[in-house]
Amino acid sequence: MGAIASTEPGPSRVLPGAKKALMLLLAINLFNYIDRYILAAVLPKIRDTMLGDDPHADQKLGWLATAFLLSYMIASPIFGWLADRFSRWFLVGCGVILWSIASGESGRADVFIVLLITRLFVGIGEAAYGPAAPTIISDLFPIEKRGQVMSWFYMAIPVGSALGYVWGGILVESHSFSIFVPGWKSIAVETSWRWAFYSVVIPGMLLGILCFLMPDPRKQAGAAKVERRRAKLSDYLRLLKTKSYVFNCLGMAALTFAIGGISHWMPTYISKFRHAGELDRVNQIFGLITVVTGISATLLGGIVGDRLRTRVRGAYFIVSAFGLAMGFPLFLLMLITPFPYAWIFVFLAEFFLFFNTGPSNTALANVSHPSVRASAFALNILVIHALGDAISPPIIGALTDYSGGNMNVGFAVVGAMMLVGSIFWWWGARYLDADTERAQAM
């Protein structure tokens, strides 16, 4: 089955069923990030259960994030290639079901190596989803609305991350309760950190099944003119020659290196290193801050990017660069400010770091031709995680171990990459408009 692509980088109007598809993809993305950050919320309990007095425990816990990201980024180009040729909804459904089952198995793991393997399978499942989902959105919405729509989709990142922290924080401590079944005795149930993983299995599988019922937007020939052609090697090579695409990948990689490593350790950092409260309480406060800043900044960034698109050259990159340039000094102030006052800088830094989410991902879609768009997102996933959060969590863990437990050292070193990402986006802004126009004319 060949890929179906238009001669422009999107439809001329919103296609039928677009809002329904967006809501389903948003819900899936929400559970995607709930699953990712449940792990961060329960790391201290995993350490106590599986690693005990291991002197390299922090570094090993960092490898849990790396294992997931290695399989995610390596499998993404494969699924991106498939998504350019076969039903994207089918791939998304299969991926969601796979990662949901693997998450449940993470909760069942009794030894560290088994937990490490389950995170590999979670990554494979998400690789089937990651490149296809934003491509489906680009197939359904015209370029004029894409920034705001992408912001709605990517709003699930902070909200899902926050819910992962909060939900993991609730279940990180053991709770006992009884279930009364008529005709039977009451059943005593005791929860633990493992239940945080169990709880995402059924919702994830139901969302995966719904994907099999969705129509492929590329086949809606009655709603939009389409042209069937198979992507050529030259189409893929053109991505590597598109300067704005390359700078965008580098900027996102620098940000992912910083924010991926920091977010993996943040509850542990605040609770254990800064002694700012019990882990469950810290997870709940940090989760609430992430929800508020994530929703407001992600949506505002998309709106500002769309409003400035016809007025400021390279607007999507300018908005993204501005966010990182503001976020880094606020992050440094968080490191040196005592709690509870440091929560103010956590809030402000997160707000500006989320500002780029909609604009940067919209730019990816706008400069890539539809016939290779899923592959463009897949290559982006490979680059930003290979150079980003696949390596930063264990780096922070290692720096913490080798500095006598001073996590500020790892946070400051890794966080400095925020400035590098800002520079890449400022630099790439000069090429963005021309590359977008070139993609439209292809």
Image (cartoon, rainbow, N blue to C red):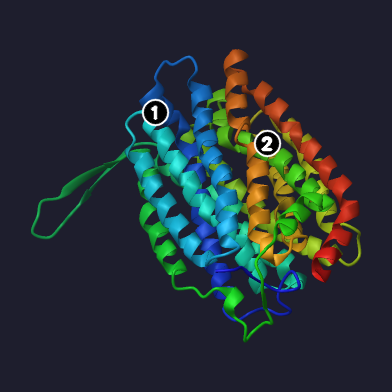
Separation of disc 1 and disc 2 at Cα? 25 Å
User: What residue sits 73% from the left and 38% below the top?
Assistant: 254
Which amino acid type is shown beneath numbered disc 1? Phe
Q: Residues within 10 Å of mark 2 (few under 14, many from 20)?
A: some
User: What residue sits 73% from the left and 71% below the top?
Assistant: 145
Q: Residues within 10 Å of mark 1 (few under 14, many from 20)?
A: some
How far from the left and from the top, in percent, is residue 183? 8, 59
348 vs 19: above or below: above
Inspect this view and state whether residue 165 appears.
no
Which amino acid type is shown beneath numbered disc 2? Leu
How far from the left and from the top, in percent, is residue 148? 71, 66
**Position of residue 159 in the picture relative to residue 416 (left or right):** left
Q: Earlier in the sequence, mark 1 or mark 2?
A: 1
Inspect this view and state whether residue 51 appears.
yes
Q: In the drawing, what numbered circle is on residue 39?
A: none
Quarter occupied by residue 53: top left
* Secondary-structure class at tag 2: loop
Quarter holding the C terminus is bottom right
User: What residue sits 70% from the left and 56% below the top?
Assistant: 233
Quarter occupied by residue 304: bottom right
303 vs 251: above or below: below
How far from the left and from the top, in percent, is residue 92? 50, 60
Asked if labels 2 and 1 touch by Cβ distance under 8 angstroms, the answer is no
Look at mark 2 in the image and give the residue it sits on: 387
Q: In the drawing, what numbered circle is on residue 112?
A: 1
Task: Please state which of residues 121 and 155 is positioned toward the viewer in this rendering.
Answer: 121
